[in-house]
Amino acid sequence: MRDDVTTVAWKELSEVRAGRGQGQRSIAGIAVATILVAIVIPFSAGAEKFGGMGAMTIGALIAAMWVLTSVPDSFAGERDHRTLESLLATRLPADAILAGKLLASVAVAVVLGTVAIVLSVIAANLGSLVHGGAGDAASILWLDMGLGVMLLTLVAFALTNVGILVALRASSAMVAMRELGLGIAGIVLACSFGVRALPKGASTGLADAAADIGSLSPVTLAVLIGAAFIAVNAVLFGVTRARFTRPKLVHPHG
């Protein structure tokens, strides 16, 4: 089983390097986003204002961008490129295909997110030195960076599972990307408008709760968020594994 997973993961990574499907455009888009989000913003803010949570957030954001653009192509794209039949004709079990593709996607996301975290920390520290901020120029701790890598790994794993579930029912990679993007945008908008529509008392209570959460240390907050993501990931992976079958791969609407 381990060799089968490694085979599928290596195939996926090789295709990413070769620029399969959306790969090159995804990496180019993420490179631009990294320059803007992981360098310009932290440099302008400085280490004191940017802080450990800023580095964690940017790492997770860059990782999420990769997953949301690459996973649909990795799964539904197999049907578009007519390589799905040859993949299913091998002796590889469905679990190995799932685990290998998931591992490759999360691995690339972790690398990109980690690079973004390191760049953001360097940029924030340089910003403090250049702008002469009052805080310590090296105030972003290595522990915060480590927690950021942990969180972006959990975020990437969760979004990869969501992307797989969407891709399994989509007729093509473009349809999967569109459905995934619209779904996430819809959730964000619904949460935003839902908060604004709350009665004044409920809104005040929510603001107080957010302030209490914001007062927690980055370590405590990261641990709480990580625990929540671990629980969510366990459920998502169970659902994904149950639905990831050969008939579903061939006939997404069957």
Image: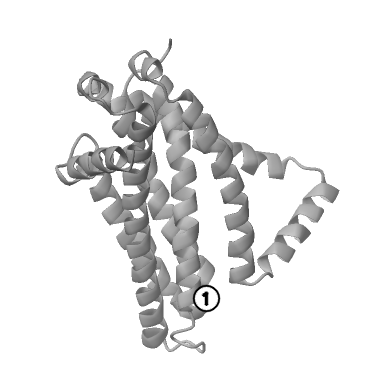
Task: Name the quadrant containing residue 114.
Answer: bottom left
Indicate the quadrant containing the N terminus: top left, top right, bottom left or bottom right: top left
Task: Name the quadrant containing residue 59.
Answer: bottom left
Task: Judge by depth and name the residue closer to the eye, 1 or 168.
Answer: 1
What residue sits 49% from the left and 52% below the top? 154
x and y, in percent, of residue 165 in the image: 46, 29
> For mark 1, what is the residue?
49
When the figure is inspected, residue 183 is found, relative to residue 146, above or below; the finding is above
What residue sits 31% from the left and 40% below the top? 5
Residue 43 in view: yes
Dot 1 amino acid type: Lys
Left or right? Give the position of 254 relative to 193. left
Q: Extreme left residue here? A: 18
What residue sits 61% from the left and 55% below the top? 227
x and y, in percent, of residue 139 in the image: 49, 83
Indicate the quadrant containing the C terminus: top left, top right, bottom left or bottom right: top left
**Secondary structure at numbered mark 1:** helix
x and y, in percent, of residue 174 in the image: 32, 26
- Counting the numbered discs, the total is 1
Count residues near mark 1 (Cα–Cα under 10 Å), then give few for <14, some for 14-19, many for 20+: some
Residue 185 in view: no
When the figure is inspected, residue 60 is found, relative to residue 78, above or below; the finding is below
